[in-house]
Image (cartoon, rainbow, N blue to C red):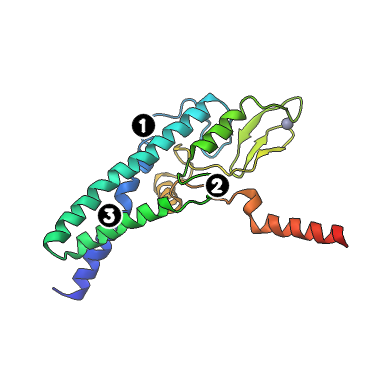
Amino acid sequence: MSLGADLTRLVAGLLIGMLLPRIPLLFFTRFIEMERDLAPHPDPIPIGIPLVQRMLLMRRVHGMCWIVAIFPLALGLVILRSSPEPFAMGMVAGVAWFMLSRMIPQDANRGFSILPMSLIQEINNLREPESVCCKEHFLQWEVRAVRCRHCRSVATPQPRPDLGRTRSDGRLMGSLRILLMDGNPVFPVMQDSVVVQGVELLGEVTEEE
Ligand SMILES: [Zn+2]
């Protein structure tokens, strides 16, 4: 068989191996009507029970991705045992890529999952904070952080991950973005940002002088 055909089958297998495990993330909450309690994408979501419930649900959806990943991996390995089929090789590599991307944590302190329990706990604690920022205290999760709607003070600098809402940028573009980001937030955590660190460093230098 020609090299071109082998290469096409390898790439096709790779794409399927990468896509299949992410199917629950793409379709589970978005194509059934599950939006009743949450503000439509990309509006901020008020901190409350519906948000915490949705985070717990998304955690389960991420877990489902692992289960779905077993099928292409097992199929690929079974085929590879009998013949070095490029499609199967691609599929196994695609699933391995998915697994690696999930196992390397973004923030080692938080845990390995995209929606770790510690984050859900932190958001849940914000429902009844010990101190309030202003009289009209109303916390909501914006793209970059949890902020008060009125005084704009940051309650936690955690960017918002994908919460399974039907995306405003359309099904196709939305799905593509979810595939690329894997449900992770688009922005880094505010304190980790190079720009923020640079500004802080500059502040320290000026103070010293
Ligand atoms: Zn406030």
Classed neighbour count for the residue bearing mark 3: other residues with Cα under 10 Å, few (<14), some (14–19), many (≥20): some
Q: Which mark is residue 16?
A: 3
Q: Is residue 186 left or right of residue 148?
A: left
- 76, 178: nearer the viewer: 76
Q: Earlier in the sequence, mark 1 or mark 3?
A: 3
Q: Which residue is mark 1?
A: 32
| Secondary structure beneath label 1 | loop
**Amino acid on which disc 3 is placed:** Ile
| Screen quadrant of the C terminus | bottom right
User: Could you tell me residue 91's position as x and y percent?
Assistant: 25, 57
Q: Which residue is mark 2?
A: 109
Q: Residue at x 53, y 44 (%)?
A: 110
**Amino acid on which disc 1 is placed:** Ile
User: Residue 194, located in which quarter of the rendered image?
Assistant: bottom right
User: Could you tell me residue 144's position as x and y percent?
Assistant: 61, 45
| Residue 131 sits above or below residue 18 on the image | above
Q: Which residue is farthest left?
A: 82
